[in-house]
Amino acid sequence: MEVHDVEMVMSAVAASQYPTDQLPEIALSGRSNVGKSSLINKLINRKSYARTSSKPGKTQTLNFYRVENELYFVDVPGYGYAKVSKKQREKFGQIIEAYLTSRSNLKGLISLIDGRHEPTDDDIAMYVFAKYYDIPVLVVATKMDKISTGKWNRQEKIIKEALDFNPVDQFVCFSALTGAGKETVWEWIEKQCAI
Ligand code: GTP
Ligand code: MG
């Protein structure tokens, strides 16, 4: 999709604050600092529309970005960041769970995993959770510019094995720096949202 118009319309922590215009929604989850906001910026061709930071824990609410009046991206607080207090983490967990389990507009989850490493327990738990609730998932391995393309297949295999990856889902290697994988991500989104 050629994106010209994006608007951050909502910062929500409860269902009463979600948008009411019934557009399809695609959520993005992943540990803090994995590159969720960077992926959104790359998809919409903006340098820093969604706030990115080298400091983890930047995104603390569900941020709804309306794209071309066609769909919403829902930027979700990052999980697994030790310096966020336990109480805060539990709060994030509740916000995310309430949204993912109750939102009929939700058409798919983009689950971001750091492509340089094995998935964390939290990454695996998020995937299992999405499968339990029958949410279609696109697993995106991020920061792939940091490893040579010759090692991409091996990383894909490691990540899929750790997740017990279901072939109904899709996997893509991505870099917000080079734009690798961007077209595949858009194709998956358009398919889920029937655009
Ligand atoms: P939270 O909002 O804290 O959950 O983080 P986030 O997942 O939104 O991560 P964010 O997009 O803010 O990126 C975190 C850091 O990783 C930033 O310094 C980014 O510039 C960097 N980063 C993100 N994606 C890539 C990538 O594909 N390649 C490289 N080299 N760096 C990246
Ligand atoms: Mg973010």
Image: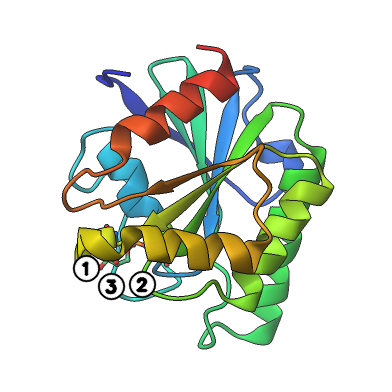
Q: Residues within 10 Å of mark 1 (few under 14, many from 20)?
A: few
- Ligand 1 within 8 Å, label 3 CB: yes
Q: Is mark 2 within 8 Å of ligand 1?
A: no
Reading the chain from its start, which is encountered first: label 1 or label 2?
2
Cα separation between marks 1 and 2: 7 Å
- Which residue shows up at 49% across the image and 28% down it? 189
At 45% from the left and 59% from the top, the residue drawn is: 156
User: Does 9 sit left or right of 133 as displayed?
Assistant: left
Q: Earlier in the sequence, mark 3 or mark 1?
A: 3
Residue that numbered label 3 is attached to: 54
**Could you tell me the amino acid type at mark 3?**
Ser
Q: Relative to residue 165, is residue 49 depicted above or below?
A: above
Answer above or below: position of 108 versus 113: above
Mark 2 vs mark 3: which is more N-terminal? 3
Mark 2 touches mark 3? (CB < 8 Å): no
What is the x, y in percent for residue 89?
65, 75
The residue identified by callout 1 is 146
Displayed-image quarter of ligand 2: bottom left
Q: Is residue 148 left or right of residue 163?
A: left
Q: Secondary structure at mark 3?
A: loop
The location of residue 184, given as percent across then percent down, is 38, 33
Disc 1 CB within 8 Å of nearest ligand 1 atom? yes
Residue nearer the viewer, 34 or 182: 182
Give the x, y percent position of residue 104. 76, 28
The secondary structure type at the circle numbered 1 is helix
Q: Quadrant of the N terminus?
A: top left
Give the class, few, some or many, for how many residues have Cα within 10 Å of label 3's Cα (few <14, many ≥20): few
